[in-house]
Amino acid sequence: MPVTPGGGTPPRSGGNLRRNAVWAFVGAVLASAGWAAAVTAVPGMVSSSSSPRSLGSYHLSDDFCATAKPTKLLQTYTVSDTSAPSHHTDRHPALDSMNCSMSLKRTGGNSDSEYASVYLRADLHKAVNPAPELEANKELYRARGYQVTDISGIGEEAYYLYKDDGSDNYHSIYAELDVRDGGMTYYINYSASYTEGKGKPPSKDDLRSALQSDAQDAVRAMRQ
């Protein structure tokens, strides 16, 4: 047996290492048990920002044009008699989706400038949290020069987008209202073009009021 300077035998480090390993293992087991108990008691502790959100009672419909009919907007416009509304519903384990498209004609109007279109869509996100994407979408629109206004009273979050993109006498109007409630996202967008003196679409505030009303009705209908 080797002798240390000054006499005696060297310390038995192997035993200490084994004891340290045992205590490390015991600590890991206790920590694991504590984490499991915390997860059971407080599931939200392990919910990441990308975890799916609850869909509550939101559900698909086979005809989104009927379910989410833009009643308020149709007080100003009628559905064009040259193009029937179209709708589609898709089902998938990760994402259910439904949409509706309508060509509109200004009630009482008789020129090309009196036409508009409206598109509605709802998605039920079952695999991811759509909140970050909705927020990114809002910032991208703002960066492209759209006026963005937060809307309260619809879902967990909602905002209104508006832009009058044109020059001289020609204008192209775009308005949209986006909503998220849990894992459900919905939007309705309106677009129209006009030449001054030959007709004019509703104002920014009138469009906001119409789209907000129609969004509230659609969100309510999807829960029934």
Image: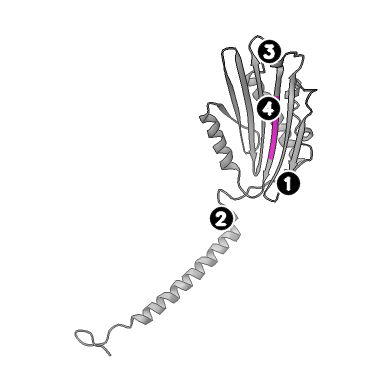
- Judge whether residue 35 is colored magenta: no
What residue sits right under mark 4 in the picture? 211
Which mark sits nearer the N-terminus, 3 or 4?
A: 3
Please tell me the numbered disc located at residue 9: none
Label 4: state its secondary structure.
helix
For marks 4 and 1, give the CA distance: 26 Å
- Judge whether residue 119 is colored magenta: yes
Residue 188, position as x, y percentages in the image: 67, 31
What residue sits right under mark 1 in the picture? 91
In depth, the one of 30 and 210 nearer the eye is 210
Which mark sits nearer the N-terminus, 3 or 2?
A: 2
For marks 3 and 4, give the CA distance: 21 Å
Label 3: state its secondary structure.
loop
In depth, the one of 54 and 201 nearer the eye is 201
Q: Amino acid at mark 4?
A: Leu
Residues marked 3 and 4 touching at CB (< 8 Å): no
Which mark sits nearer the N-terminus, 1 or 3?
A: 1
For marks 2 and 1, give the CA distance: 29 Å
Residues marked 1 and 3 touching at CB (< 8 Å): no
Q: How many marks?
A: 4
Q: Is 6 displayed left or right of 216 in the figure?
A: left
What residue sits right under mark 3 in the picture? 199
The part of the chain drawn in magenta is 117-122
Q: Amino acid at mark 2?
A: Val
